Amino acid sequence: MNGSDSVSDGALSRRRALGVLGGGTVAALAGCLGGGGGGTGSLPENGDPDLLSDVQSFPNQGNEHVQRGTEVDYSTQPPTSGPHYSGVVEAGFYEEPQPMGDIIHTLEHGAIVAYYVPGELTDEARSNLQTWADDYTDTWQSFVAVPNPYDQPQAPYTLTAWRHLLRMDEYDSETVRAFAAEFIGRGPENPVR
């Protein structure tokens, strides 16, 4: 390599490994190298129905883009679809609320958005939510954790996906995993699972 090449040793090793392997092995290895699931493990095709029995599903409230700052009256709290801004919220664990118009667009991209009530957030929940946010960062299957912006949240933890919502009175990592398995990467804009 000469000085103008900017490929790191790690990237070069991955390229060499991918060049030697064939077919499905390359796809599987590429998913491990660049996809989610490091600390959360790989997801099954669908979530455990017993853990998802309380998921609420709502009609599509639309997916039109509106000008940033437009007030939208969503039919659910938190919303699961509807008019939204053109921006998105990047994967991550946030300590400040994010613009709802961007959150809805993020859901349309196939994200899971987990809302928590800050005063009820346990250390275990925070750590688990952070791991999900660190593991699932792809534009089309990301995980976002944000404080619940409503004055009187209906539960300490609420999981949302496009058109789906699940409230939890206590944090349960297996339920989060089941919800992610069922919905992450399956938004209407560009489903990848």
Image: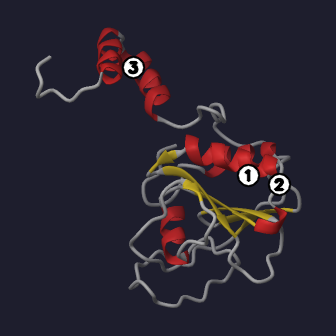
Report the mark closest to the observer, 1 or 3. Answer: 1
Q: Mark 1 — residue? A: 126
Sequence order check, earlier mark of 2 and 3: 3
Residue 117 appears in the picture as rendered? no
Q: Mark 1 and 2 residues: CB-CB less than 8 Å, in contact?
A: yes
Q: Mark 3 — residue? A: 26
Q: Amino acid at mark 1?
A: Arg
Residue 184, disc:
none
Residue 191, given in percent of the width and then of the height, sits at 47, 51
Q: Amino acid at mark 3?
A: Val
Q: Mark 1 and 3 residues: CB-CB less than 8 Å, in contact?
A: no
Residue 122, disc:
2
Report the mark closest to the observer, 2 or 3. Answer: 2
Q: Amino acid at mark 2?
A: Thr
**Residue 97 or residue 138, whichever sits in front:** 97
**Residue 52 or residue 94, whichever sits in front:** 94
Residue shown at the point (46%, 89%) measured from the top left: 70
Residue 30 appears in the picture as rendered? yes
**Residue 113 or residue 55, whichever sits in front:** 113
Residue shown at the point (47%, 23%) measured from the top left: 28
How crowded pointer 3 is (Cα within 10 Å; few <14, some 14-19, many 20+) is rated as some
